[in-house]
Image: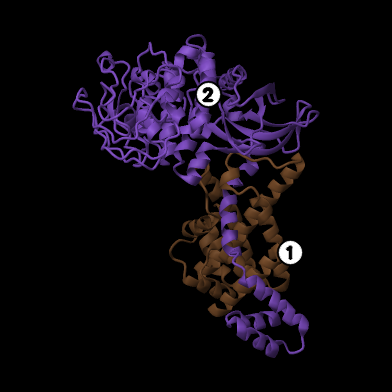
Amino acid sequence: MTDADAIPALVSRAAEGGQAALQLADTLYGELRRLAQHRLASERAGHTLSATALVHEAYLKLAGQRATPDERAHFLAIASMAMRRVLVSHARARQAAKRGSGERPVTLDEALVVGASSHEELVALDEALGRLEDKSERQAKAIVCKGYGAMTDAEIARVLGVSVPTVRRDLRMATAFLRRELDG
Amino acid sequence: MTERWEEVARVFGLAMDAPFEARAAILDEACGDDDALREEVEELLAADATGDDIVGKLGDVVAALAPGLDRDDALGEVGLASGQVIDGRYALGEVLGRGGMGIVVAAEHESLGEAVAIKVLKPAAMENERARQRFLREARAAAGIQNPHVVKVRDVGQLPSGAPYLVMDRLRGVDLAAVIAQRGPLPVVEACLIALQVCEALATAHASGVVHRDIKPGNIFLERATHGDLSVKLLDFGISKVSPDGDDEVLTGTSDLVGSPAYMSPEQLRASRDVDARADIWSLGVVLYEMLSGARPFRADSVADVSMMILVEPPPPLGEGLPPALLRIVEHCLCKRREGRFATVGEVAVALAPFCRAEGQRHVRRIRAVLGEGASEETSVDLADTVAAAPLEVERPERRPAPSRLPWVVAAGAVGLVAVLALRDPAARTHPTTPTSNSSTVAPAALSAAPSASVSSPVSSATVSTTKPEPASPTLPPAAPRIAPRPAPTIDPYATRP
């Protein structure tokens, strides 16, 4: 049995948090990577693969249509967090490799498709997100849901257990915080 | 949420939607004498007012990074690791790309400190002796071609596992496939400059008896030169045909479909052994078509369907607004019968050059030097309205109803020139280009495609009239498309005004 088979059951329990959510996050981490690689293998070079599209594709593939709105929101949130981990560790690995070789190589499809500094940008942004987490985990989570999962404010509100106006304020304030951190 | 941050959030929420002038009062009341709180909120409000969309940007960065995911594990597949030094010389870095046969790894020559790229054959491909030989042949073929537009092969070696590797210059930039995927159709000047540089690379290869056979956007690398210009490097001579006979048959028996089907010439699809320089010219035509339109001319879901289209179907008309002469160049490259195509890349270059101004001529001169002066004297596409159409948005050509196989005769509407296209049809040659009555236009002799033409620079010899163009000459056969007369373009750097 693959990990993926266990997902629908995990999804329905993940909304309650705890172990099931963690397990789902781990499963999704692997799934998202596989999905990304599978898609890359079939796409032409230079195709820009949207991470948010991947998150939603993972949802359709793994959670199916039986999920309740609550389950859907939780699934997307967990998938967004997993996507963050996938991409940040990727970006860090690339950065480390660059430091290792002493310069910044530009790869075949990277320079135009990926802005030259995307890895650095993502890592910097993630570090700022980490500082936000220290202040408010909820706000950081809202940003991840929005940025990595393209979730709606209503979906985020469902996951975070707050009102939609609160989500809007959180997102605005968190965005302002990140701007300030990145400019400084 | 920390208690402090909760407080900041509360005040931020109170003030964020208030009109600017009302904020001070809100902050006064909410913060009382807590200056630190007020300062924090004010900073956030200031940051809130700047337009930088972090979440949107995060989405962009995230989208941009995802394609790189698959490269993380590729080194392991060939039994190597980042940081490893091979042959005591090359320190491996990260994986730059992967193809069907191998992967390309960034590396550094330890003692020289030079950045190189190392191509390593995949273990699966290594078991196939044919693939192995092909790989080594790439090294030989590419090493023998000295041209600034061909990626330089510096070294060949063998890993402890027995896998061969070849060491190339490390390029900085992006391949054409990525550029087209990202930007869609390219501007005419840019597309022609890229094609011209490919011509230059191919001229050197063809002159030494090498047919590339896999010209496609993925093998055309655009390097950013230090002065900011794009410089094309042709990659992957992996399936190149080194000599007309010899061991080649062993490697590319007829059962072997080598190359990328969508870019393959009809003759290559029929029998991969039977190819010459004109197969590369076909593929270049496909690439040119794709650069100009953003899409390949022959698209279908299966290789069989693509092949069928290549063999029998004319490519769909290129997008409107392109200079007619350019459309004819593409069409001429994509003639199903290779006898009907440009005979050499030199000819292609001469036809393309006018779209690139002085730079185009430089390429033509270098290509001539490589191919021998005579080779590109003759061009089979008239340059008359190539020249006139240089301001690119001017003309909306009428479509050819279908590719007419026989006389490639067209009326060049733009400047009232009548030009003759088809070289292979002797009848077509008997209609010389004739100046029309209300025009002082002189047809450049070289453009009428007579092999004996002695004019060395077709473009500079063209004299272009500013008067209204004359419709097609009565000598044209009925199949010839007519291009609607239009006012002459106002700027034409190539015209020598009478």
Question: From what the image shows, is residue B480 above or below residue A96?
Answer: above
Q: CA distance from mark 2 to mark 1?
A: 49 Å
Chain drawn in purple: B
Q: Please identify the quarter of the rendering in which residue B369 is found.
A: top right
Q: Return the x and y of residue A16 as percentages of the image width and height.
A: 59, 72
Q: Amino acid at mark 2?
A: Glu
Q: Return the x and y of residue B184 as percentages of the image width and height.
A: 45, 44
Left or right: residue B91 compared with residue B412 = right
Which residue lies under the disc numbered 1? A184
Chain drawn in brown: A
Give the numbered dot on residue B200.
2
Question: From what the image shows, is residue B206 above or below residue B396?
Answer: above
Q: Are marks 2 and 1 on the same chain?
A: no
Q: What element does badge 1 sit on?
A: loop
Give the quadrant of the C terminus of chain A.
bottom right
On what subunit does the disc labeled 1 rest? A
